[in-house]
Image (cartoon, rainbow, N blue to C red):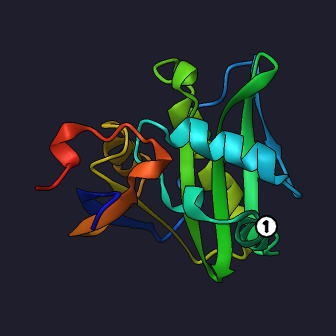
Amino acid sequence: MKGVLNVGVDVTFLRMDRPVMGMVPSLPVTASVVAVPRCTLGFYRYLYNTVGQDYCWWLRRTLSDRELAEVLGAPTLEIHVLMSKGEPAGFYELDRGQAPVVNLSYFGLMPWATGRGLGYALLHHAIFTAWQGGQCAALTVNTCTADHPRALPNYVKAGFRKLRTVSEEWPVPESLGLRIPKHLVLG
């Protein structure tokens, strides 16, 4: 199809059936996580586009403002932003729409924040938040070969177990201007 890059990825689906026990890493004193109950479109697009720019996050970029507002307005969606030294350093999104299963639908760091020991601590914050309140029977997440190379190992290390891996082909619009790694481009 003209104007589309066909991107091939392997998507791994993971699940956690009980909360993590024992010591978990904490965030540095210069960092905190803030729940954003009514995230604006502009702020959400900033988070999503900046965190996902190197990892082929494209689906939500294709949504109109109206469509995205509908997604963000769902009462089952939670957005949490990692703040470090006064600026956004990453975010995660929990979707409770399939309760009692909670999905960690988006998770990532700003490019400047990777490699600083924030990601694994933020992941544990997301896990704790998902299980908080006793309404969660299982926590799911998926990652793919377009994501950061430490994503899958960190999910497994944090207590998720792999369910399955499937190959997918994504029709990514070239108009989005994403930098797609050459090894992911098909044909």
Left or right: 21 in relation to 86:
left
| Residue 121 visible to the viewer | yes
| Local SS, label 1 | helix
**Direction right: furthest residue:** 38
Residue at 67% from the left image edge and 41% from the top image edge: 47
Residue at image position (37%, 58%) is 172
Crowding near the residue tagged with mark 1, few <14, some 14–19, many ≥20 C-alpha atoms within 10 Å: some
Relative to 116, say whether 54 is above or below. below
Residue 38's x, y, as percent?
A: 89, 58
Give the total of numbered labels.
1
Q: Quadrant of the N terminus?
A: bottom left
Q: Tell me where residue 99 appears, x and y as whole percent.
A: 65, 83
At label 1, the amino acid type is: Ala
42 relative to 161 in the view: left or right: right
At x 31% / y 43%, what residue is drawn? Answer: 153
Residue 24 position within the rendered picture, expressed as x and y whole percent measured from the top left: 56, 38
Question: For mark 1, what is the residue?
Answer: 69
Residue that extends furthest to the front in the rendered view of this protein? 2
The quarter in which the C terminus is drawn is: bottom left
Q: In this orientation, does residue 22 appear? A: no
- Residue 6 vs 133, above or below: the answer is above
At a point 53% along the width and 33% down the height, the residue shown is 119
Q: For residue 100, what is the image quadrant?
A: bottom right
Residue 11 position, x and y percent, is 29, 62
Of residues 21 and 1, which is closer to you in this image? 1
